[in-house]
Image: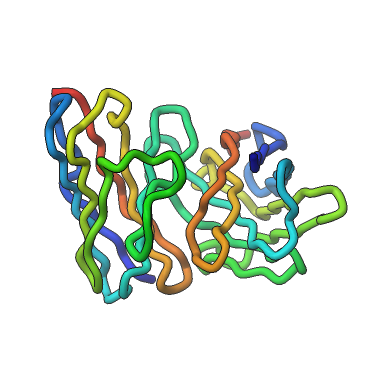
Amino acid sequence: DIQMTQSPSSVSASVGDRVTITCRASQGISRWLAWYQQKPGKAPKFLIYVASSLQSGVPSRFSVSGSGTDFTLTISSLQPEDFATYYCQQANDFPFTFGPGTQVDLK
Amino acid sequence: QVMLQESGPGLVRPSETLSLTCSVSGASMRNYYWTWIRQPPGKGLEWIGYVYYSGSTKYNPSLNSRGTISVDTSNNQFSLKLTSVTAADTAVYYCARVTDSTWYFDYWGQGTLVTVSS
């Protein structure tokens, strides 16, 4: 299985801050990576994937980059509704695997 | 708008079979893959497997052949059965749709907590 890691595991930030989350795959996955946002008690929400654009309704302050094994999700100006846990997911090979999550909370 | 809703028992006894159904509305099941994902309390996400609308399936080997996913397109539903459950199978179970042409998950159900306990 392809192992996914994320750093940091948590980050404390303020509204307006720029936040960057890193995701690393144990082997190359080309650009087959997506990001999800999960709020407490809710299902994950599909945000964005590397090879294409934002999902419908997702603000442009979210952006992604990377290829191979190293990827980043950037929130350019953190908003109150962005406080959540973010997961990366590789779609290069079965079984699909997720990172352990990065919790973004209020400083 | 595509909506998914999980249903099934919230409590299952150890060694028994967990059975869940996902009802799909707002979209046809045709030409899409449909999937189950679970999340143990306080932990991360684990992909369980998928079913294509035609009935073909693929599973995560971590299940050790205990899982079966089936589809009923006439009723816009798909189901998960997990045999010989243990406490390690306690989780919130989500059903989701696989995106068109990529292996991501674009629409999710709200999730249902299944506890394995005697």
Q: Is residue B92 visible?
A: yes
Q: How many marks?
A: 0
Q: Is residue B13 visible?
A: no
Q: Position of residue A69 (x, y in %)?
A: 23, 70
- Which scheme is used to colour this image of the protein? rainbow
Q: Is residue B31 left or right of residue B50?
A: right
Q: Position of residue B46 (x, y in %)?
A: 46, 53
Q: Position of residue A89 (x, y in %)?
A: 38, 58
- Quarter where residue A104 is shown: top left
Q: Nearer the viewer, residue A19 or B18?
A: A19
Residue at x 22% of width, y 28% of height: A105
Query: Which quadrant does the N terminus of chain B fall into?
Result: top right
Residue sitting at the far right: B74
Residue at x 44% of width, y 39% of height: A57
Residue at x 25% of width, y 41% of height: A61
Work out whether A27 lies above or below B53: below
Q: Nearer the viewer, residue B65 or A24?
A: A24
Q: Nearer the viewer, residue B90 or B87?
A: B90
Query: Which quadrant does the C terminus of chain B fall into?
Result: top right
Work out whether B117 lies above or below B107: above
Q: Is residue B14 left or right of residue A100?
A: right
Residue at x 16% of width, y 40% of height: A19
- Quarter where residue A91 is shown: bottom left
Q: Position of residue A86 (x, y in %)?
A: 31, 43
